[in-house]
Image: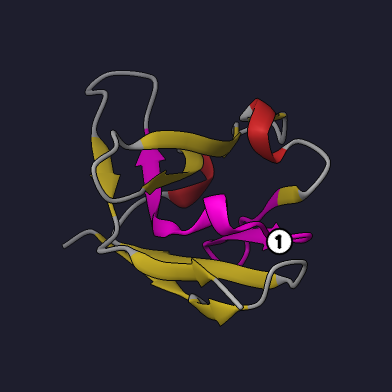
Amino acid sequence: QVQLVEHGGGLVQPGGSLRLSCAASGINFSIYAMGWYRQAPGKQRELVAGINIDGRTNYADSVKGRFSISRNNAKNTVHLEMNSLKPEDTAVYYCNADRRLPPFDNYWGQGTQVTVSS
């Protein structure tokens, strides 16, 4: 059974920092591209940051320079370091695992709430 379990969400003041973690089980973690997505109320889910199996990263323009994604294949974990948080970063953040080879399976975590407010 595949599981992606996120931790680290919460309430933070503008300008603050949070670190999200996602622990994967039931998959060969190292062959999956990993990503963090977010969905704010009334908006579509969007990619925040991604990290490929070779370690290459990509970021949404809105978070470049503030967020950093990393992975630890030995521990089957992926992290999102979020700095200089803004109220517009408020959303539910989801971890995603994506295999870009057959059978192209894709998995989601349950999400963790991040609220940026004073």
Is 81 part of what is drawn in magenta? yes
Decide: is 118 above or below 6. Answer: below
**Residue ranking furthest to the left:** 1
The image quarter containing residue 46 is top left
The percent position of residue 63, horizontal first and vertical second, equals 68, 40
Residue at screen point 71% across, 61% down: 81
Q: Main secondary structure of the magenta part?
A: strand
Tell me if 88 is positioned left or right of 107 in this view. Answer: right
Asked whether 74 or 89 is in front, the reply is 89
Image position of 75 (left or right of 40): right
Q: Which residue is mark 1?
A: 81
Color theme of the render: secondary structure
Report the magenta residues as a range.
69-98
Residue type beneath disc 1: Glu
Farthest residue, direction front: 118
Q: Residue 80 vs residue 36: left or right?
A: right
- Is 110 a magenta residue? no
Name the foreground residue: 49 vs 56.
49
Badge 1 local density, few (<14 within 10 Å), some, or many (20+)?
A: some
Q: Who is closer to the viewer here, 19 or 75?
A: 19
Query: Where does the image place residue 44, in percent across and percent down from the top left?
Result: 28, 33
Please name the residue shown 25% across and 64% down the image.
110
Q: Position of residue 71 (x, y in %)?
A: 65, 54
Residue 69 locus on image (x, y percent): 68, 49
Where is the N terminus found, in terms of image quarters? bottom left
Secondary element under disc 1, as helix, strand or loop, is strand
Quarter holding residue 15: bottom right
Q: Residue at x 32, y 37 (%)?
A: 45
Q: How many marks?
A: 1
